[in-house]
Image (cartoon, rainbow, N blue to C red):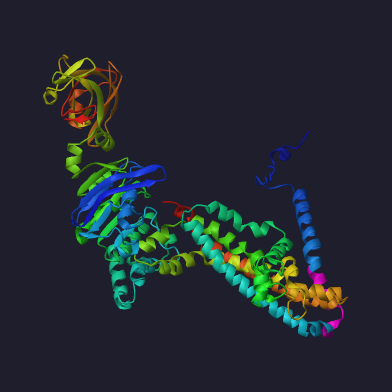
Amino acid sequence: MSVEVRNIKKQFGRFPALHGVSLTVESGQLVALLGPSGSGKTTLLRIIAGLDYPDTAEGRVLFYGEDVTELPAHKRKAGFAFQQYALFRHLNVFENIAFGMRVQSRRMRPPEQEIRERVNKLLKLIQLETLGDRFPSQLSGGQRQRVALARALAIEPKVLLLDEPFGALDAKVRKELRHWLRQLHEEIHVTTLFVTHDQEEALEMADRVAILREGRIEQIGTPAEIYDHPATPFVYDFLGNVNTFAGQVREGSVVIGKTKFAAPETAGQKEAGAIAFVRPHDIHISRGPGGPGKLKARVEYINAVGPFANVELSRTDTAGKINVQLSQEQLGKLHLKHGEEVHVELRNVKIFTEDYSI
Amino acid sequence: MQPPSAINTPRRIRRRGPTSEPLLVRWLLMFIALAFMGLFLVVPLVAVFVNAFGQGVGHYFGTLTDRFTLSSIKLTLLTAVISVSSNCIFGVAAAWAITKFDFRLKNFLITLIDLPFAVSPVISGMVIVMVFGAQGWFGPWLIAHNVRIIYAVPGIILATTFVTFPFVARELIPLMQAQGRTEEEAARALGASGWHTFWRVTLPNIKWGLLYGVILCNARAMGEFGAVSVVSGHVQGKTDTMPLQIEALYQNYDTAGAFAVASVLTCLALVTIVLKAWAEKKGAVSRPADWGIFGGV
């Protein structure tokens, strides 16, 4: 357990940012704090770093079992990389990275020779060996972010905290840096928490993902757990790439529009409003006779670029949109035509009633 | 009929830029600006030096090496050094407090800093007399303890400090607000103490703005007349600063002498302007192109 936060509450004026958040991070893991803006994820990261403090005495932050709640930021040894990098603009890349070593008290400070060696090693690690004497304003966004990471790593942090590490970069550089950071993590294995609002980024990079919503942790788990078994409608919705159907739970089945789908898991439940979530690749398109468990829909749009084809349908009863993902091969067999009426079957339906999930 | 060649000759059209004006307008505007500058800046500047040497080089240097003049130069420099350095400390502290912390009365403090700009210097001087003078709040106590403030050097320094008080703070507040807190936060997270953060991160980032404020503050401190005049008591050789010495010489019908001292003050002003331009340029160069992105978190 290298980082543990317990019952963190924080309010900014009248805006509650965190309502008693607790979280444990295993040593050496890469954990994503995922959530929409205003969900409190950056506030939580800043509290772990000591740049903000929890409001109540029950709120504690522990590093390797040691309570650091009362320690100021500069005594925590938490490497922090800011969204806008916050490189020291009057220092060159080399001195930016060396900063954390140079400001240590005389007893703790490594000798000059060692500082130089460590900075050079880090420059090599971030693949900017030749740019040590450049100033931050002379670097690209991706280079700046790498310098910010090296600067945070230079203090040999107990934990690395990254606030939207790729937020300000363009799509291509983002992708490259993501892989690079994941690789770097494999190499140095320092416990890392990073904040992001990009679900793809979180699912692709992290060992574990914590999803935040309005100051609470909604779900925490491995990317596969989160993607395959979202705990709440919010998580389903936030991860995106999902179709929602409003319906009614009735006698062990769920009724969507006029169609009844078997839902044995709801057996014994009272009649109630429900929302069904189905991922685009769990929808099966067919022609032929309708029947139980099939919805009628019209083909609106077909996009066949890439390995998968996306088909947009609209329901004939409510005109609600349905996104379907299928392989190019399946699409070829179906010979779908624009405006054509088809039947869809739903598989792996996840049903949420009122506030109870099954 | 026109010969065909006249039709085929392409006509060159000179188009003006969107913000350019016809030649006459441009010329007129430039003339007005230059004439105005000449009349109100160059002529008086020349007049100072012409009048200063009006009774010969001997009189000029005689006045400058006069006991009273030398004493006024010394007092002016002493006053400037003390009030500029104290305003420098105050300005950095105020700008730091306003931009790096959130507290109540913050806007009130920002407004209050401007007060010395808003009131007449004479009133500033009178306020100091009201507080420290024989009839003032602390007057009896000061007299009992044999401390002289009014009609003495401390009063002059107090008055000058009060009048020049906003320069450094006013210069630094917008600069530090634009820079935000993230670099300081980064320094803290990297293990720097508050002291280290100030010397290694904050100060290097504000140094040109600070220098600019100090230069302006110094120019005003050396030239202050109104406030100082009220508290000085005009004891020649003791409580006369250069502006007061100029006035004293002028009142004694020594016009050339008055202008001789004025010429020294003018030279100091010219040096200030050159330094100011240099600090401005340096400050602008040291700002990175993507200045704006350091603003918020």
The location of residue A115, given as percent across then percent down, is: 31, 73
Q: Tell me if residue A132 can be seen.
A: no
Image coordinates of residue A214 in percent, x first then y, are 32, 40
Image-based side of B116 in relation to B192, left or right: right
Quadrant of the frame with the N terminus of chain A = bottom left
Image quadrant of residue A148? bottom left
Would you place residue B13 above or below residue B249 in this image? Answer: above
Question: In x, y percent, where is residue A258?
Answer: 22, 14
A21, A225: nearer the viewer: A21
Screen quadrant of the C terminus of chain A: top left
- Give the left or right position of residue A114, taking residue A2 as reference: right
Magenta span:
B45-58
Left or right of B204 on screen, residue B134: right
Please tell me whether residue B67 is drawn above or below residue B40 in the rendered image.
below
Q: Is residue A223 above or below residue B151?
A: above
Q: Residue at x 16, y 27 (%)?
A: A347
